[in-house]
Image: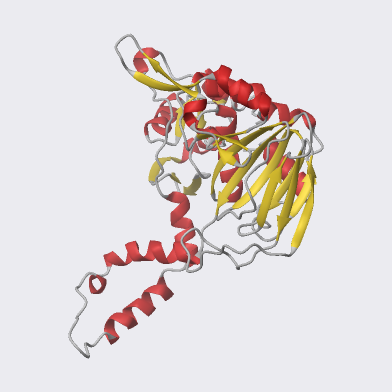
Amino acid sequence: MTHQLVNAIETALGWSGPDQLGRGFARGNVGDPEVLSRILTPNKLLDIAMRRSLYRPQFRLFQDGKEVHPGEYFTDTVSPRGQSIPMVNMQRLGGLLREGATLIMDQLNTFDPTMEVACRALQWWSHERVQVNVYLTTNEASGFPLHWDDHDVVIVQLAGEKEWEVRNTSRPAPMYRDADPNTTPSEEGVWSGVMKPGDVMHIPRGFWHQATRNGSGSGYSLHATFGFTKRTGASWFTWMSDWCRREEIFRHDLDRSPGADTVALQEAAAEFVRKVSPADYLAAYEQQPFPTRDVPFVDIFGPLEGVVCTTHFRPEIELEGSVVRVTAAGRKILFSGEALPALELLLGGGPADLRAVEAAVGFEVTEIAETLVKEGLCAPLTPELFSGYTGLVTSRLF
């Protein structure tokens, strides 16, 4: 999948792939203003808030550095049958934004197809899980105080301006669950300045930072924060604690008697660590099943006309003799070797019209596509999902 946002981030930061993710602070500019408005605008964000039932902590508002009580901008809409549905009161929200406030919407990729596709493209690129939080700050509202994140972030300034301060870490590689609370900010500055439209900033895990429009006067800022939760040595050990249950010796009760002989258990543990490498874990992580939220294919509504691959990570497609093996999302599916060219197109990450795929490969592909949808590797290409790719992902198959 070739996504314009991924290309823009690489261009801005001077990267050629994700290898520098988490390794050091970086900043630059995408140089392409058109991609910014295609990703998100303030009015589109407000439209999303208007049309959905949202509640904290996914949707929050801050003023003067403090969270605004949801009662100030939420209204319970009561249906004729007495069902209460929390909805944003857009008039009250507008008043708070005019006064100066920061609106935060977490995991916008769960609501908006454009952000859904962008996060999927970044996942295929980075081999890590990605989510996006969006921040709209108006007038002279302040942001969060100095803090650090337990994951790497790539910040894209979509519109307006915001002042930032970034400091170095005060604890190497801090974690959400850690042996040290890590509450004392570093005094070592890394960068301070104003993020303007098109600016991109990479802040590694543990770097202290804060952003504000305090003192900036009338105006606004809209930025998207893409969070990359990378795997750690602790993640590997956690995975091994589940994997080791396959070995009988680890399933037996521990002997509590004084002077109990644990040599065999300790030797088995050491051998297990040598046998199951971090690379094994990373490969297994990318292939584990994740829950999907795709629209199902129901044939009574009409034939399948287009699909798109929606796996969290790029599927593995391997030709073994006369058989093609597709591995993704906890599935291993075998196809005839003749299906290889169709599978490469259908699982390429871009929207694929089945008639266009058939014209490219020279044979009928409906059965293959239906199998991929049934197994959860692809989703039917609805107009709403297709809109998330338009203008951002190039596909010659639609």
Q: Is residue 302 left or right of residue 92?
A: left
Closer to the camera in the image, 134 or 278: 134
Q: Is residue 317 visible?
A: yes
- From this view, report whether residue 72 is shown above or below residue 190: above
The image quarter in which residue 241 lies = bottom left
Q: Position of residue 144 (x, y in %)?
A: 62, 46
Q: Is residue 93 left or right of residue 6?
A: left
- Residue at 72% across / 54% down in the picture? 166
Q: Which residue occupies 59% across, 29% down?
A: 114
Q: Name the side, left or right, on which 356 lies relative to 261.
A: right
Is residue 41 visible in this depiction of the protein? no
The quadrant the C terminus occupies is top right
Whether residue 111 sits left or right of residue 332 in the image: it is: right
Whole-percent x and y of residue 164?
74, 47
Q: Is 59 placed above or below 152 here?
A: above
Numbered marks: total = 0
Q: Position of residue 352 (x, y in %)?
A: 56, 26
Along the viewing direction, whichever of 369 and 253 lies nearer the viewer:
253
**Relative depth, front residue between 280 and 202:** 202
